[in-house]
Image (cartoon, helix red, strand yellow):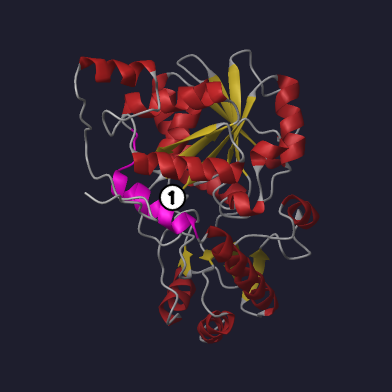
């Protein structure tokens, strides 16, 4: 048989790997990482994805998981067990909040939400059993930028771990581990894969010990990612840097356009100079601000929101983000639906708030579609 040297890793679409005999099996346990036994424990495709993200983030090891939610679960369980307590930034993805408040509390892990103005003064919120703080590099949906250096200093001062959801920023813009964070998580579903055809997550650890613990959790809880989705995500990852540059360029142009439109009341985008953390975002992101933004329509009524969505010709209403094609979402009715009305109001998540995931299309095409949709509104 001729020697085969594929340029791209093949898909190892198998649930189990074979051994020659008992001696060969023993080598699997004696020399971890040298061969494979069962895809829930590891697979060449998921390992390739994890290692590539690990390189991008500068970690000590990573593990691919079945979704962004399972990545959050893996990260929390790396540091917490029943009887422990964790802190979480108040402005965070609604799914993360639901996991912490509705499910992990049932497992005996308590959670306290930290208001934005208290993130860097955690002393009064930290309990003897507190283990970690979970925060996002750029918050969902209002794009508040966390000062990771200050957050690292504060979490180290109070003796807890810092876990950062870097999904919105990606390692192209910000590398939390390099700034001192203990663990980074991603919804690979979003920018890392980038084509809206994969559901996946990844956990990147700052130490080998934490990495091994997260891998053990993935195996034991069955949070592994399938070979095919691993392969798709690894393929998407190869164009991440190119895609992110165009996402950022387009998002800046769209934010500047929306900021000037009379039917838009407010725009949240770190690239705008009036954004409260603009200078921080500029320094922490090396002049790149991401492809996500949110804006509030001047008229905060259901009829106006529906009319705007229906008037868009090329931008669909799709409750996810970070694909190559631009889409809009509605945080109040989708990502943050599980929050109480009081929480939604406090965070500023209202009916007129639109989250825009800016894709990599030609900039002018996006501006034309947004302009005609906004001009159609009678505000």
Dominant secondary-structure state across the stretch colored magenta: helix
Task: Please tell me whether residue 102 belongs to the stretch shown in magenta.
Answer: no
Which quadrant holds the C terminus? bottom right
Name the spot of residue 211 as percent of width and height, x first.
Answer: 51, 27
- Is 43 or 275 nearer to us in this picture? 43
Task: Please tell me whether residue 226 belongs to the stretch shown in magenta.
Answer: yes
* Image quadrant in which you'd find residue 257: bottom right
- Is 55 or 341 nearer to us in this picture? 55
* Image quadrant in which you'd find residue 366: bottom right
| Left or right of residue 110, residue 151 in this image | right
Q: Is residue 77 something that shows in the picture?
A: no
Name the spot of residue 286 as percent of width and height, x first.
Answer: 74, 56
**Residue displayed at 58% across by 67% down:** 247
Q: Range of the magenta residues? A: 223-238
Would you name the residue on which mark 1 appears? 337
**Residue displayed at 47% across by 67% down:** 324
Image position of 287 with respect to 52: above or below = below
Q: Residues within 10 Å of mark 1 (few under 14, many from 20)?
A: some
Name the spot of residue 96 as percent of width and height, x first.
Answer: 48, 40
Name the spot of residue 42 as percent of width and height, x first.
Answer: 34, 33
């Amino acid at each position: 048989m001729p020697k085969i040297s594929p340029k791209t890793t093949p898909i190892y679409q198998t649930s189990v790997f074979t051994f020659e005999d008992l001696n060969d099996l023993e080598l699997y346990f004696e020399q971890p990482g040298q061969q494979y036994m069962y895809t829930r424990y590891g697979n060449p495709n998921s390992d390739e994805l994890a290692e590539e993200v690990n390189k991008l983030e500068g970690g000590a090891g990573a593990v691919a998981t079945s979704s962004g939610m399972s990545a959050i679960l893996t990260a929390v369980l790396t540091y917490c067990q029943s009887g422990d307590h964790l802190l979480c930034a108040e402005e965070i993805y609604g799914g993360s909040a639901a996991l912490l408040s509705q499910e992990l509390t049932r497992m005996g892990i308590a959670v306290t939400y930290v208001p934005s103005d208290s993130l860097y003064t955690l002393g009064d919120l930290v309990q003897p059993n507190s283990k970690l703080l979970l925060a996002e590099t750029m918050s969902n949906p209002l794009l508040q930028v966390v000062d990771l250096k200050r957050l690292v200093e504060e979490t180290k001062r109070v003796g807890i771990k810092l876990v950062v959801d870097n999904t919105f920023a990606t390692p192209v813009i910000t590398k939390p581990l390099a700034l001192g964070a203990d663990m980074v998580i991603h919804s690979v579903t979003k920018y890392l894969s980038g084509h809206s055809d994969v559901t996946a997550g990844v956990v990147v650890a700052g130490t080998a010990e934490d990495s091994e613990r997260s891998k053990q959790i993935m195996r034991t809880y069955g949070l592994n990612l399938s070979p095919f989705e691993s392969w798709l995500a690894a393929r998407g990852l190869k164009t991440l840097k190119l895609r992110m540059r165009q996402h950022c360029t387009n998002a800046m142009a769209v934010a500047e356009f929306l900021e000037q439109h009379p039917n838009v009341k407010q725009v949240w985008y770190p690239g705008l100079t009036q954004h409260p953390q603009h200078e921080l975002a500029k320094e922490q992101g090396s002049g790149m601000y991401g492809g996500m933004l949110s804006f509030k329509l001047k008229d905060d009524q259901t009829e106006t929101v529906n009319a705007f969505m229906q008037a868009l010709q090329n931008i669909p209403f799709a409750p996810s983000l970070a694909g190559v094609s631009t889409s809009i979402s509605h945080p109040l009715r989708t990502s943050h639906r599980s929050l109480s009305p009081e929480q939604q109001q406090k965070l500023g998540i209202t009916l007129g708030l639109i989250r825009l995931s800016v894709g990599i299309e030609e900039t002018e095409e996006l501006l034309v579609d947004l302009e005609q949709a906004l001009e159609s509104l009678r505000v």
